[in-house]
Image (spheres, grey):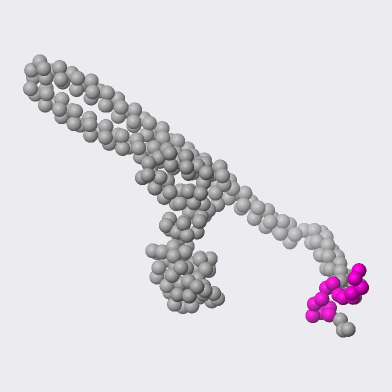
Amino acid sequence: MTDHKHVGRMSREHLQYIKDNAATKSYVEIATDLNRDPKGIQKAMIKLGIQPNLSAKTYNILNVVKIEDKQFWSMLCKQFTTDELEIFRFQWGKMVEQFKSDVLPTEELQMLDVIKLEILMNRNLDEQHKSRNELDKMEQEHRAELDLGDVANLIRCENLSHQIIALRTSQASLTKQFQELQNGKNSILKEMKATRSARQLSKANSRESFLAWMNDIVNDAEKRRELGIHMAKFRLATIDEEIRLAAWHKYEDGMVDQPLLTPETVKGE
């Protein structure tokens, strides 16, 4: 494959390749395969009625808001394990993809908090699993000691009973903590959605305002007349300025030339 990217109209073979691979490859990967510009592939997919897909593994190719480039990455490396950092990379990439890289600094912090809470929830579930296994083991041991029935075993049973109560209390505490983490995560997600909805509404309102302005022009004869006069004056002023700039002009160094030189204004010697 040559170093120069294919440009111009998309061939039938390329369009067919896009159709055949759109479900399994991102538009960046397809662009690499076809040696074309990713934006061209993206536009072609939209024309074909295909939603352009950006897989998580293409973020390094595009350098799209990589979390490793953020100032808080070094802090995260101290706070989380290697496996948890991988979760951070993946979740960050997917959220940025979802928002089409349109992320404000405050939204970055919200995304950061959401992922942190997700990891803490996973930690909590791991602790619950370990606690549940240990509790099951102690309960079995407790039943076995009770079946023996001698004094020594009764003392052992009493100790096990205290440990079982402590584990059950721990289980309840972990469950409550998990619920609090989940509520916190849901609250941030709800807030993010509200914030982004407000931003999208603002954009929509700006479009609606333009349409409302156009509607006023169509329905208001006086406004149309005022705009018509203004445009006519602007057109006449443009013509006068073109005539002035196309005339011969003597510069300070004595050279005579036309400031505006086009095929329409060029003059003979």
Quadrant containing the N terminus is: bottom left
The quarter in which the C terminus is drawn is: bottom right
Residue 192: image x %, image y %? 52, 43
Magenta span includes 257: yes
- Percent across and percent down for residue 198 are 58, 46
The number of callouts visible is 0
Q: Residue furthest top?
A: 151
Q: Nearer the viewer, residue 10 or 28?
A: 28
Q: Residue at the location (59% across, 48% down)? A: 199
Seen at 44% across and 51% down, the residue is 94
Q: Give the residue at x 10% y 15%.
A: 151
Q: Residue furthest front?
A: 253
* Occupied quadrant, residue 131: top left
Q: Say whether residue 156 is magenta.
A: no
Depicted 191 relative to depicted 258: above or below = above
Relative placement, left or right, of 204 versus 144 is right
Is residue 80 visible in the rendered structure shown here?
yes
Q: Decide if residue 263 is on the left or right side of residue 93.
A: right
Query: Which residue range is magenta in the image?
Result: 252-266
Q: Is residue 213 left or right of residue 234?
A: left
Is 266 or 79 nearer to us in this picture? 79
How far from the left and from the top, in percent, is residue 171?
Answer: 30, 29
Q: Nearer the viewer, residue 39 or 189?
A: 39
Compared with 32, 196 (above or below) is: above
- Which of the 4 image quarters holds residue 78? top left
| Quarter-of-image position of residue 231 | bottom right
Q: In this rendering, does residue 225 appear at all?
A: no
* Chief SS of the magenta region: loop
